[in-house]
Amino acid sequence: MSDVTVREAFFDALRERGLTTLFSNPGSTEVPLLVGLPDDHQFVLGLHEAAVVGMATGYALGRGDAALAVLHTTAGLGNAVAALATARFNGAPVVVLVGQQDRRHLAFEPFLTGRLRTLAGEYPVWVDEPARPQDVPAAIVRAAHEAVTHRGPALVIVPMDDWLQPADVERERAAPLHVVRATGTAGVDALADLLAQAERPALIAGSLGEWDALVTLAERIGAHVWQESFSAQAGFPQDHRLFAGHLPADRTRLRDVLDRYDVVVCVGAAAFKQYPYADGRYAAEGLRVAVVTDDPAEAHRAAAELAVLAPPAAVCRELASRLPGREGENAPPPWFAEPLEPGEPLSAGHVLDALQARLPRNAVVVEETPSSRPELHRRLQAVEPLGFVSAAMGGLGFALPAATGLRMALPERPVVAIVGEGSALYTIQTLWSAAEYGVGALFVILQNGGYAVMDRLAERHQGGVPWPQVTHLDVQSLAAGFGCPAQRVADHASLTRVLDEVVPTLAARNEPLLLEVVVEQDRDFAP
Ligand SMILES: Cc1ncc(C[n+]2csc(CCOP(=O)(O)OP(=O)(O)O)c2C)c(N)n1
């Protein structure tokens, strides 16, 4: 934290975004923001909120960019709703700051507390109540991006005590400085400029259905390619010489990776997707970050200087044809784990090594093995689109039904789900459907005796866990009950024997098979 207040950081953000004219009819909840308005900001008083929003709408239409209105809690926002609807129908990008009572006693519903989030109904294109005061400056910039992209009013609700809180000036902001939308060549021009200046560029692949364009770009500019953490799908061939590995999902380890580069472009990927909280920045100051994505929300919240809102593959192709080729070998350090020595007790690593050695290139792998996901990334390479598929929302119960559906859609491709036994139980009845409809997927259940990921995360806290280990569970019998053929494997020789038999049949199978493999828990979990 710093001496700079949220209010000061907010005015800086308004300057940066060209929002220094404030159309308003204010009340007490806006007083801490407005008293002592900096000289380079202009205040325009409207005598009713319909007039305030109407003027901001005209101003936005006239300048062809976002305009700012400041409204007073329920009374102000309520009065403005019809004018906000007009802004929406007229496609006017109006950013609306709505004042709220003081956070410190909101729970008691003091006088003027607003129930604001849904008050304007469906007319806003975006509504935000920043989780922390420190998030307010980014929220207003993001609101401007949302308002322009979606052509309508975007609301940010700010409790009145937020303004005098210390700003967080250390961390990156959750909104890019520039968003370039897919009109003309401006986006490609800006990215080409950035990459032309790079000495050590890296690309980060998101969940891309089409891989060729990114491969062409990476080869052209000799950039390392990382896979975004917690992707829904792989986006780059993991046996490619420029593939550098999977990005870590915490800031501490992410910084170590990003330190190696001077320019990073996230392609269909977030800047940056994280899991456990860690202090500090994503990357040292000075790293230049850009995002190209066709997902507006991913663009608008990116911690980047530039976000290009356009189809990633088309942009990559265009960039590859424009940028000069880079000479020389630039292979990243090896990231793939050496196969484990065979033996017992079996670990997830043994199972993954055995699959890596046997699965054909076109295999579809669906992952839902929380504590062994890092092992899976180190040991099993996705080499074709859909070679790795996972539930990006983090909800368990995806892998068994998704693998079944994938196999129904792609009967010529071998489909393997690798699933923790805890995860499998959320949708175990899928086995009945797979058996009933002759779906030849392979379900590999890693039976490690508990919710290992929860236990690993709990070890970072003091105290014991209230949940038990899951020791008396017989997945093989459950499968039999659903009419799904099943085998249980507990030693290395059986594992390789079964996989030698089954994997060659996967492309042609018309009945599912479940393998319950008893493994020891992975002790180190670093997502
Ligand atoms: C629907 C749902 N409920 C609860 C959770 C929380 N959760 C995350 S991992 C996990 C345990 C998973 O156990 P298992 O599949 O055996 O994998 P392991 O951790 O042992 O690798 C739970 C309960 C979740 N992600 N989704």
Image (spheres, grey):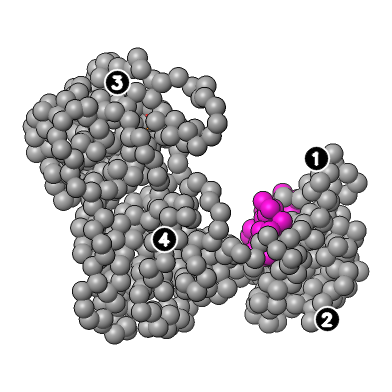
Residue 256: numbered disc: 4
Name the residue tied to disc 3: 475
- The Cα atoms of the two marked residues, 4 and 1, are separated by 42 Å
The residue lying at 65 percent from left, 75 percent from top is 17
| N-term mark: 2 or 4 | 2
| In this view, 122 is above or below 70 | above
Q: Which residues are magenta?
A: 118-140
Dot 3 surroundings within 10 Å: few (below 14), some, or many (20 or more)? Answer: many
- The Cα atoms of the two marked residues, 2 and 4, are separated by 42 Å
* Left or right placement of residue 314 versus residue 165 in this view: left
| N-term mark: 4 or 1 | 1
The amino acid sitting under disc 1 is: Ala
From the viewer's side, name the closer residue of 264 and 108: 264
Name the residue tied to disc 1: 107
Q: Is mark 4 within 8 Å of ligand 1?
A: no
| In this view, 55 is above or below 458 | below
| N-term mark: 3 or 4 | 4
Dot 4 surroundings within 10 Å: few (below 14), some, or many (20 or more)? Answer: few
Residue 39: numbered disc: 2
Residue 349: x and y in percent read 24, 38
- The Cα atoms of the two marked residues, 1 and 3, are separated by 47 Å
Find numbered disc 2 in the image and state the secondary structure of the residue it sits on. loop
